[in-house]
Image (spheres, helix red, strand yellow):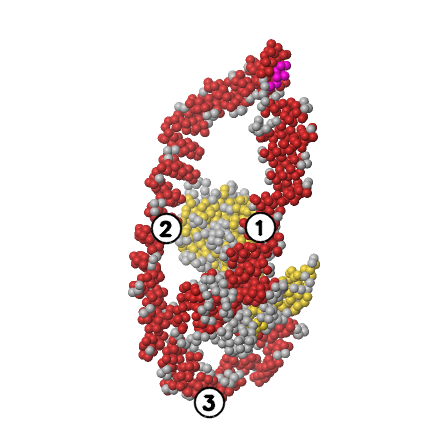
Amino acid sequence: MQLKHLKTFISPQDGPFKVTAVAWAPNSAKLAVCTVDRVVQMFDENGEKRDKFATKPADSNLGSKSYQVTALAFSPDSTKLAVAQTDNIVFVYRVGEKWGEKKTICNKVVLQSAATCLVWPGQQPSFMFGQADGKVKMAGAKGSKSQTIYATESYVVSITASPSGKGIISGHADGTIVRYFLEDEGAGLAKGPICRHPCPPYALAWGTSTFMAAGCDKRVIVYANNGKVAQQFDYSRDDKEKEFTTAACSPSGQFIVLGSFDRLRVYSWMPKRESWEEAPSKEIINLYTITTLAWRRDGARLIVGSLCGAVEMYDCCLRRVLYKNKFEMTYVGLSQVIVKDITTGSRVVLKSHYGYEIDKVQIMGKDRYLVAHTSDTLLLGDMANCKLSEVAWHGTGGNEKFYFENQNVCMIFNAGELTLVEYGVNDIIGSVRTEFMNPHLISVRINERKQRGVEDNKKLAYLVDWHTICIMDLTKGVTTSSLTHEQKINWLELNETGRKLLFRDKKFRLLLYDVDTEVQTSLINYCSYVQWVPLSDVVVAQNTDNLCVWYNIDMPERVTMFPIKGEVVDLHRRDGHTDVLVKSGVDTISYTLDEGLIEFGTAMDDGDFIRALRFLETLEMTRETEAMWKSLGELTLEASQLHIAERCYAALGDVAKVRYLHDIIKMAANITKETGEDGSTHHTVKAQLAVLNKDLEKAEKILLQRGEVDKVISLYKELQRWDEAIAVAQSRGHPDLAVLQAAYSKWLLDTSQEEKAGELKEKQGDLTGAVHLYMKAGLASRAAHLVMRHQTLTNQIDLLQQIATALVNGGQYEKAGDLFERARSYQQAMEAYKKGQAFRRAVELARVTFPTEVVGLEEMWGNYLCTQRQYDAAITHYVEAGHLKKAAEAAILARQWSKAVQIVEMQDPASCKEYFAQIAAHFASVQDYEIAEQYFIKGDKPHDAVDMYIEAGKWEEAYKVASGCMPLAEVKELYVSRAKDLEGQDKLREAERLYAVMGESDLAISMYKRHKQYDAMIRLVAAHHEDLLVDTHLHLAKELEAEGQLKQAEYHYVQAGDWKAAVNMYREKGLWDDAYRVAKSQGGTNAANQVAYLWAKSLGGDSAVKLLTKFGLLEAAVVYATESFAFDFAFEISRVALKSKLPELHLKYALHLEDEGKYQEAEEQFAKAGKGKEAVLMYVHQQDWENAQRVAELYSPESVSDVLVGQARAAFDSKNYQKAEAFLLRAERPDLAAKFYKDGDMWTDALRIVKDYIPQKLDELQREMEAKSGKGYEDLLGQARTWEQSGEFSRAIDCYLQLTTQNCGSEEVLVKVWVKAMELCIKFVPSRSVDTVVLVCDRLANLGKYIQAGDLYLSVDMVKEGLDMLMAGEAWGRAREIAQNIAPRYEKYVDEAYVDYLRAKNQPDQMQAVDPGGALEMYAGSGDWEKCLQLAEKQGPDALAKYVAMNAANLIKSNAPISALQLFTKYGAPPNPQNFNIYKCLCFETLGAPLERSGGYQAYSQLRNMLLVLVEQLSKTNEKGTLVHKEFEECLLISHYMAMRAACEGLSQAQDKIVAKLSVSLLRHTKIIPVDKAFYEAGIYCKAVGLDSMAFVFLNHFLDLCEAIEEGSLGNLDNSDFVDTDIPFEVPLPEKQCVSEEKREEVKEWVLAVSMDQKVEQSLPTDERGTYVASLTSPHTKVTSPPCIITGFPVLRQRVEFKKGGRCANQEDWNKFITAMKVTPSSELSDVWKFLTQWCGIPNNLSYSFK
């Protein structure tokens, strides 16, 4: 906390002028100050004095100076000010809300003792004050009486409130501190005296979790809530500190300021340490004693009053932040932030009510909303309405997304969860799971409109998924309703009352959902805009070019529509007008709605029915107004306003209701007239209204309470409610009860209500008659129950048989069996028991009558119990039946493991292997490992035994088992994997054990390294890799050094023998003592001396000299510094201690600088060392002749000649012959000039020099020239240049061309020479150009220089030869460019060559630009079909079709027909005849795939869709009606049937029958479908739905087909069962079986079992035609019926016809399909429906298809 002085409100006086009291208003707008003059001065928040008033004494007779003001306190609403005075009174002044209001005394509290202190806690209606007599009292703003809270015997010196305002503490003169709670804070703290301070606690403050007291002993003591000392700050030894006089706690409770003499001490609460920490004190010179402190409500300002009358204001904050250059955030505490809008000056105080530290504050939502986080809460605020909320919020990582579109609630999304926080409420009002964060998919309504009888209305509508809306009542926290829509929902919104929900789907359909009735209504289609009109239930929407308005949404069919042009963009309602804004082009048009109709809805919601009626009277009758009349009528009828209701129904034309209401009104009027009472409240009127509302129970209750029984009976008789009438008559003992019952009986029989009549007969005792009536009504069960209850009826055998038969037909088998048994028809009873699964009764009967069947029944009983998951009970029955295997399985499923063990031990182990593993798993789970191992081994599951032991940590047992049953590699892999798991669990010792068992010490070493357990790592390396121990130490040392663990790094460096690395490490870190220590201990004296030298060098100056002198290394250090080129250090030491060494140092330094190339500096050092000649030589060596001559002239004149010779030699080398000659002549050395010319083959110049300056040597020179001769390439080159210089260009060319690879080894020289020859030829001898260029280009080509050769050819216009050379050099780009731009006649020639090149190099990507067709072939040849098809798609449909077909054929050959099918699905299947074989092959491969490789619905649907497109395309070509067209139509039909079957399979029993029919229908297509597969599927599916006869025939024929396939011939196949059917006989014989051997064996067993059962007819069923039910053609009438598109069965009678292709369906099958789509929707069924609409169109009689 920082205190910064801002302003002086009142300047100090020269003498004492005590400020007795100050107080801030809770709204921070006013500050009250009172001094010893007893005048209250009022300041605004900026320190400007705005008002003042004088206080009054309790007794005016005593004078104005008879008292002092001791305390001030504002009321919570800031409009009243309490003033405590020493004259035994407390005044309460009304100061008002605004400045300038009149100050009046609104209350005064007369006391028996002086008021010494005062506090008015926030949010409390009363203030508390202490008195001189020790009492603490409470009084309010009204009423002059006060109430004593508690009393003590000691003067009250201070009083303060808790930060929450729910409690107070007072300090007394005897040091006692008393606590009192005004409200329960929930902390369970005690009231009363809690501690005794060592001195009177004049400075008393209640902070967070503790309170602080101080006084004249200069000690500050912090007390915990239990009164014990928590902290103590002792300033008694500080002579500058004086006694503490006052204290104040910040509003947040986290800061306390204590005032003393010239000083403010600030204490901050540290939440993490739960203690107070003192901040630097604020020294205020010449302020003198601080008498009062006051903290502004927001905690940002502190007022200080002094003994001399000064009033100072200080700014209090931890820090300030400027946010977006618009808001200033002042952190006045850890849990409190003041946010100020700089532009408007408005402020909001953001505070954590729980005292948590606020981490970060953000302003979002168009700079209106505050968001802040603490460690455990989230703070939100609406700055416009000053509504703040704080809710619990934990561990979200700051990933929340906030939405502020709703002004009442903030929506927070985080990790798929939506949280709602209402502004101003400190609780989360709702939290739901949803993945949809779009505000248009969430609607929240928070008390936006008042409703009758509803106090708190908070509703939420949101999307659970794209198709489901959930509506939640936020006040109760429950989901009130949910709805599911078939399409994706993209917008939703509740109305303001939350009773209606509008939503729109992705097809732009607008729907209305009534939340109360859960009724969903479709409003309009193609809705582009929709909105609720504010403050009403009127809906505005746009449908294409129409504006739709629902003025009464309760009648959604009543809609007002009018055309508009443009798009609706907004809706405004203000000043009594509602306008719809439509944007048409650049214009915006306003359409005004009927405000009267809107107002009607508002009146209805407000319950003002008279106003609504008057409004409706002014309107004409339309659909909208009709709906309004109806709504008003229902509400007024409910409210018993009958006249209005009558008028409403009269307007609606409901004559019956009007007459009924008229009679009721008339009745009420008569009652009023007769009795003088309000007739509308009469019981008769109420009863009639209850009847009108169909509430008969209420009407009965009303009439019976008045004793009007006859009216009730008559009422029920009129309504044909006989039971109620008789019940009333019986309950009231009516005399006509018998007559009423007789009439009732006759009425029942007349109306065919036999059941009711039977009940009546039963009550009358006519049992036989009752039985017959029950039987007549089809209630056999009830008849049976009656017979069993009466012994007299059981003797009637025929009656029993009749009832039992009826029960069997009704599926009540057990009851039927009981009756059969009573009738002694035991066989029938047994069958009934079996069908009814009543095996107990069946066994009991069998033991008596059919003993041989008991075993079979026991097995059946066990099977049934297993289907009911009663495995425990099934065990005994399987054992009784002798089926031990089933008994074992049941025991395992029942988890009866001991029984399972007993049972499997009684059987052959080979047959029980499947159970051993389960038993073993159980015993492993109960840690009985030995038995578990035994059964794992028996069950051939040794791996599981190994896993068990590993999980149990029994590694030795695991290894024992694993070694005996697993390869060593697998054991090793297993153990290594498990060791890694243990490592992940930090069980490193156990992991090491595993690694050790497997001999994987390296893995253990790596593990310890990862976990930085280096001792263990070194231990293992020393044990297993001693040769790597040193490297390991070094590696670890480097890692530890990088991590800063230097001591450990030193240890490893030393252990590795690399102690120098440890020294360098310490040197780099500046730890020279450690470096010297290591060097001396490990490297001896020399190493230590080197370190000492480096240490001294790092110090420098006198410190370095002292250090070196200490070690006796001064001269040695200079020598070493010189040798190591540390000359600065050497000079530094020498100048201090060894000046005699300086010349030598300068010389060495000069030599070093020369080596470094720093010549100017070296020259200076040579001069200082007195070595001028060495400086000259230095420059000579560098050929810096100017400086060399300058230095020679200055320091060494004898060296001038040598300098000139050196200059001459350098000039000659640089071929500056004249300059070199001049230098030598100046040096008087012509002999050297002649020698230089001679050595450079410049014989002419050499002769000239000799002749002019040394003629005596002329003969000798001439002899040397004659001896000089040669014919090397250099000679030829020189000779050629000579010819060229002399203008003999032809000879120069010949000379250049004489250079060949035989006499010159440099290709670079040869190329330059030949090109030079060519240039000379072109420029000077053009007649030789062609021959020369051919010769040169041939030579260049032999060297591989094709590009240069081509350029030369082109330079002489030999284009073709140049192109050939460029192409030979693979410069295709240049060649093609030249051919296109310069020689178009060669363009084709170049392109053909380029294509041949690309084809040879196999570069199809480049081929695309030249020859797309060739590129396609290359792609296809290389199998890169993706690129091939991409390129083909660009080349056009023909190319695409060709290569798609090639790819598909390739895929089919690769046994991937599904991929080929997907290819045609993606790119289309054109009706090209060359593709027909591919299509047929795809059909055969897909439709004829074996069962285990069947593609399922996806494959069949893709084939079906492809064939549909193909067939439709063929029908538009010449192929229509051909054999090919018909074949593909048949394949389309088959693929449709198979897709239909795959979609329906397993959905329901009804769909299983469709599956069976489809399988039977496919038998007529066995020329395409493998015949064995077709008969197998037909038989299996018929068997599944109980068509045993058909299943037997088909599966029997299937077995015959299997034998024929094995024999390879259909010659012996018996087709007699299929005579007169359309199942073909001549079909292709499959090469191999389509059904597995296991399934064929199952079929054999079933067929054999059924063939022994005489009850199954072994023939195909026939229909009304006398023809096989699935046959399309009748052999008798030769009439062919169309196949059903759902099942393939013939369509005979009721049919559903379609608009396309003349196709139809059986109505029953169609209805089943439609029902399945609605009851069990699936994507497959939806896809089938979509296909049917494409293939067949929409049904003509769709409205009748649901019957």
Quarter in which the C terminus is drawn: bottom right
For residue 1392, side relative to residue 1033 (left or right)? right
Residue carrying label 2:
970
The picture places residue 882, in percent across and down from the top left corner, at: 32, 69
What kind of residue is marked 1?
Glu
Count neighbours of disc 2 (C-alpha within 10 A) and say few if under 14, some if 14 to 19, many if 20 or more. Answer: few
- Residue 567 quadrant: bottom right
The picture places residue 1708, in percent across and down from the top left corner, at: 53, 74
Q: CA distance from mark 2 to mark 3?
A: 93 Å
User: Secondary structure beneath disc 1?
Assistant: helix
What kind of residue is marked 2?
Glu
Q: CA distance from mark 3 to mark 1?
A: 103 Å
The picture places residue 688, in percent across and down from the top left corner, at: 55, 81
Q: Is residue 579 above or below residue 1340?
A: below
Pointer 2 or 3: first along the chain: 3
Residue carrying label 1:
1417
- Residue 1531 quadrant: bottom right
Q: Is residue 234 found inside the magenta-colored segment of the image?
A: no
User: Secondary structure beneath disc 2?
Assistant: helix
Pointer 1 or 2: first along the chain: 2
Pointer 3 or 1: first along the chain: 3
In percent of the image, x 42 and y 32: which residue is there? 1064
Q: Is residue 390 above or below residue 1326?
A: below
- Residue 569 quadrant: bottom right
In this rendered view, identify the residue nearer to me: 593 or 613. Answer: 593
Helix, strand or loop for the magenta stretch, by majority = helix
In percent of the image, x 55 and y 59: which residue is there? 1478
Q: Is residue 1709 above or below residue 215?
A: below
Q: Is residue 1243 found inside the magenta-colored segment of the image?
A: yes
Residue carrying label 3:
738
Nearest-to-viewer mark from 2 and 3: 2
